[in-house]
Image (spheres, rainbow, N blue to C red):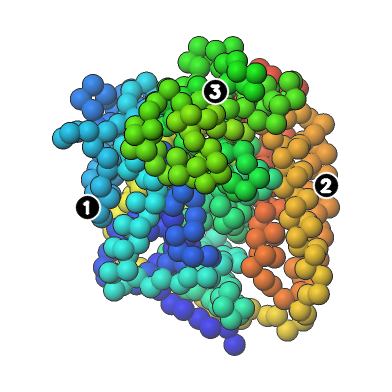
Amino acid sequence: MTTQHHFDVLIIGTGSAGLMNALQLSDNLSVALIAKDKILEGSSYYAQGGISAVLDEKDDFESHIADTLSTGVDLGNETAVRFMVEQAPSAIQALEKSGVVFTHKGSQYHLTTEGGHSNRRVAHVADKTGQSIQTNLLANVRNKTNITLFEGFIAIDLLTKNNQCYGAYVLNKSTNNVESFIAHKTIIATGGASKVYLYTSNPDTSTGDGIAMAYRSGGRIINMEFTQFHPTCLYHPHAKSFLISESLRGEGAKLILPTGEAFMHKYDKRGELAPRDIVARAIDSEMKTQGFDCVYLDISFKDKDWIQSHFPTIDKKCASFGIDISQDLIPVVPAAHYTCGGIQADINAHSNINSLYAIGEVAHTGVHGANRMASNSLLECIVFAKACANHINQQSLTLQHPEFDDWDASRASLSREKVMVTHLWDEVRRIMWNFVGIVRSNKRLHSAQMRLAQIQNEVDEYYRLYLISSDLIELRNLVETAQLIVKSAILRKESRGLHYNEDYPNTSHKAKDTII
């Protein structure tokens, strides 16, 4: 018999959005907070740059809103963007209340700038902002008696009937048993889907789980064609997924070719501070046309003490590979970094499925448009996590849940063909990198669509025959999410922001969302 857990609220995911949401929920609510890996193992923990907010008297909300909408290439939802920007200072205060100590310059915040920003408005904790936010939020969560943490529990599918969500089936990785989590409200905070690509800055957890689960349950998915490729991931055989923060370019670092030439001025008058889609395409173009394996980032004009003060994590990591960034060039390549599309969610983070919410990178609130502006992602996590909690706190949770069948594994057998899972996982990621990458074409997109459909059938058959495992759950979600990205990319008959199709190089006059 399937073990059942009953809670008022189920939160799937323990990144910044999930943890902040749990803290903002009423103490009178019982909350289950589940992490599919270690609680801190997710994209939030590795976020280096910071969180954008209007904190300087020379800056203002209208400028932050305009920059965000401009970077999003006219596809952002102005109402959602305004809400996020106006809530940003209180988001900073909420983080400080939880124990986060932002870097200061005297009595003022030390604010940096990144691509797309017209003012210095990125508050940070040196170059480990995400780590500080995550560890402090988690410490606060552990002190709350109404919150129960479940580590090593991976959600399989949502429990839904008649467009109402009642929780989820979840695999307990330590016992390999499937358990039911029944809840009045379910919040998906599972992060993005950049692991569908061969090269990514994301940790292994970013497999599109929440997006795939919501889609299978009838959730509306929007703008999945917009995957942001971070321009500068460290290029080294042993530097798995290590990001070189955009803040280096904000402080004057230059991108140069192996020949020593600067090149960004040829692509945009803003040079290194152009939005990420432009910088990533520029690097991709130079590498492909000239046959280079990577390009380089140069911040050697700054002295060692300054670098160690401002970028200690990057300095230490590069040094571990024999790169002294105060003297040496940093080899970098673009890598899949952020999913701008996702589960449609309103200003309260509610989806089109009753009692199902989505917060953080998994959600599409409309604040990123066709291209996310740097450091708006942590901001979105905190602002909409709070809005979601406030919405739930104001409701009476008296919903009666229907009976759900126990998880039936009686006809499944233990697989001796695990090589199938690893092979298909690798094939999906190579297809996406080669055919659905930074620059796309109709031919490559349709080729990807055909092969992914075949892989989907193979995965479905494997899923029916064999006992479920964490790897199989992730592969199933990876294939589903990859197909959503390809389908969305085929539907968009233009190039806009992060989506560039050689067969439709122009941007249409009317900006429209891609809805699946």
- Residue 89 position, x and y percent, is 25, 39
**Residue 493 seen by the camera:** no
Q: Which residue is mark 2?
A: 451
| CA neighbours of label 2 inside 10 A, class few (<14), some (14 to 19), many (20+) | some
Q: Earlier in the sequence, mark 3 or mark 1?
A: 1
Q: Which residue is mark 3?
A: 255
Distance between the Cα atoms at labels 2 and 1? Answer: 50 Å
Identify whether 140 is placed above or below 104: below
Element type where label 1 sits in the image:
helix
- Residue 79 position, x and y percent, is 38, 33
- Name the kind of residue labelled 1 in the image: Lys
Viewer-proximal residue, 433 or 458? 433
Element type where label 3 sits in the image:
strand
Residue at the (82%, 70%) spot, across then down = 417
Residue at the (62%, 41%) spot, across then down = 236
Q: Which residue is mark 1?
A: 97
| CA neighbours of label 1 inside 10 A, class few (<14), some (14 to 19), many (20+) | few
